[in-house]
Image: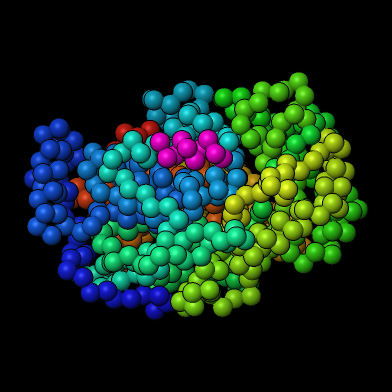
Amino acid sequence: MLGALIVAAASGFSGPPAPLFRGSNSLKEASRPSGFRLAAAALKQQRREGQAPDYDIIIYGGGPQAVAAALKASAVTGDYARILMIVPEEAPGSIMTVGKQNLFDLNYYRSAHLPAALPADYEGTQGGTLYRFLRDMGPVFSPRDMALYLQRRMAAHSNITVWYRTELTEVALQPAPGPGTGTAIKAIRVQPISRNGMGWYRYTGTRTRPLHARIFIDASETGRLVRLAGVDYAVGREDQGADKRQMGATLMYKIRGVNVYKAVKADPKRYGYALSSQGALQFWAGDEAFRIPEMIAFDRSSPHFRIKGYNAGEEGISKAFDDTRRMEFWMNQILIYNVDARKAWRDKAAENGLYPDSGGLDPEMARDMAADMLARPEFIRMVRQLPGFGEAELVMRGGKPEIGGMLYLRESIHTVRRGEDRRFALTKRDVLNGGETYFPRRIGIGYYNFDSNTYTKDESLSNPLHKPWYVPYEVLTTPQVANLLIPGYAASIDSFAWTAMRVYPNLIMLGDAAGTAAGLSLTGEFHLQRPTASEMEELHRALRAENAILEK
């Protein structure tokens, strides 16, 4: 089992998670201040006596779905659950902050059953943490400001600890308690990492002692915790019987000197621009890239890169609407094919056996290749042929184009539900028919009505979806590991459905559900693997209390 290591330890997962709020049978009763004080005292006593694990919940990953999971788990337990976040990057937000993908990819479907706390004109398909993020930061944002905002949100909860620049290296398993088969995660080890002179992460320092928790959550983009726990998975579109390719990745880069109004005027029926509630500008256009001879020649001559129609989000809030050429934008325009999101060069350098033997590009290597291509004079000359880009120039930092600190990865692995009739909990058929059969076990609504961004250069943008679908709780679980929840890229969703589920609003909805379920499990009110109908109703009640949208 890849990377799995049984670690001897004095304490660990030795049964179903013990209720955090002892003597309480309902979240409402446990939420009373006296109940919180009793719970805190019980936890402190357990820890003094060495009877409690290091943490109640350990979350791997730092993206918005990971932050949502941490915030919801903290809220549902009254800030008394000890939560540790393991974040490989140097800041929270992952792709949206470090990677500079600074748009929420909102998908407007208006529910007929909005929570009372949401404005009547709210058009997001998901509420909950997404609504809070949008209210506070808007749908387009400065990546730096978003990272600081996420830090503040987590710092407001003293029970949430975050370790940045830290990588998961080992997972310890043990037989799962109770009836049935499967395992449980007993402990993990992690190790500090830091960027070298090339900007690539390397292991530094020494691995930690085994870290124990009641519940583990893989909210990452790489599915690394799922892989190290020995869970069955499919890579990329492997489930379609094609190959193990993953959707094209993107290197975000910064540009200025663009006449936005001229850019979108080229085809106003398809292109457009919008302002966030705070006044930041975003726009989308650029399908001319598929007709400009130089760009066509570039695509044909490059084995890995493709220029696509773009979307762009303003860096900060300049309000320079009279002359958008003074604005700086993060551009989502360069597709990079055959990137394997599972690969981390630090594993290859460490020779630890965790570097997949595949033909795909390492994301850090692919980032450098794209950065070199971007820096060539012919690139900006090519981009200037787009409408509105005649005076465009790259924003430079330290003599080099300013780019994202990591790639915008769109796909990695998909958890397979071994031994069940359905290999995945959410499938192509479900997203096409609306997932109505999942209504009693829904955790939210999924929606994204655009594209897959393709797996190879000869494919056209595809997979239009026109109606929302219910997402079942089971996308978060695997029967193979009893105390693992998966609201990240490795959720049990087939590759077709993933082309739509991959965007931030859907991911944050998964994070909300996972964090809430984990918190309820710690209170003794929810079974992670086999929640009953009444337990699902309690999960729905808790999600509604946080303004989640659960009905179309």
Task: Determine whether, in the image, residue 241 is placed left or right of residue 291.
Answer: left
* Residue at the extreme top: 322
In the depicted structure, whether residue 315 falls above or below residue 60: above
x 40%, y 43%: residue: 68
Quarter of the image holding residue 187?
A: bottom left
Q: Position of residue 444 (x, y in %)?
A: 42, 44
**Horizontally, is 94 left or right of 46 in the view?**
right
Q: Residue at x 66, y 23 (%)?
A: 319
- For the stretch drawn in magenta, the main secondary structure is helix
Q: Determine which quarter of the picture holds residue 189.
A: bottom left
- As for residue 147 lying within the magenta part, the answer is yes
Residue 77: quarter of image = top left
- State left or right for residue 283 relative to residue 95: right
Residue that sits furthest to the right in the current view: 293
Percent position of residue 170, x then y: 37, 70
Relative vertical location of residue 20 with respect to residue 157 in this rendering, above or below? below
Question: Picture coordinates of residue 402 (x, y %)?
Answer: 68, 46
Residues shaded magenta: 143-152
**Of the pair 85 and 133, the residue shown nearer to us:** 85
**Rendering colour mode:** rainbow
Q: Is residue 187 magenta?
A: no
Residue 316 showing in the rendered view: yes
Residue depicted at 42% across the width and 77% down the height: 2
Question: Residue at left 68%, top 60%?
Answer: 368
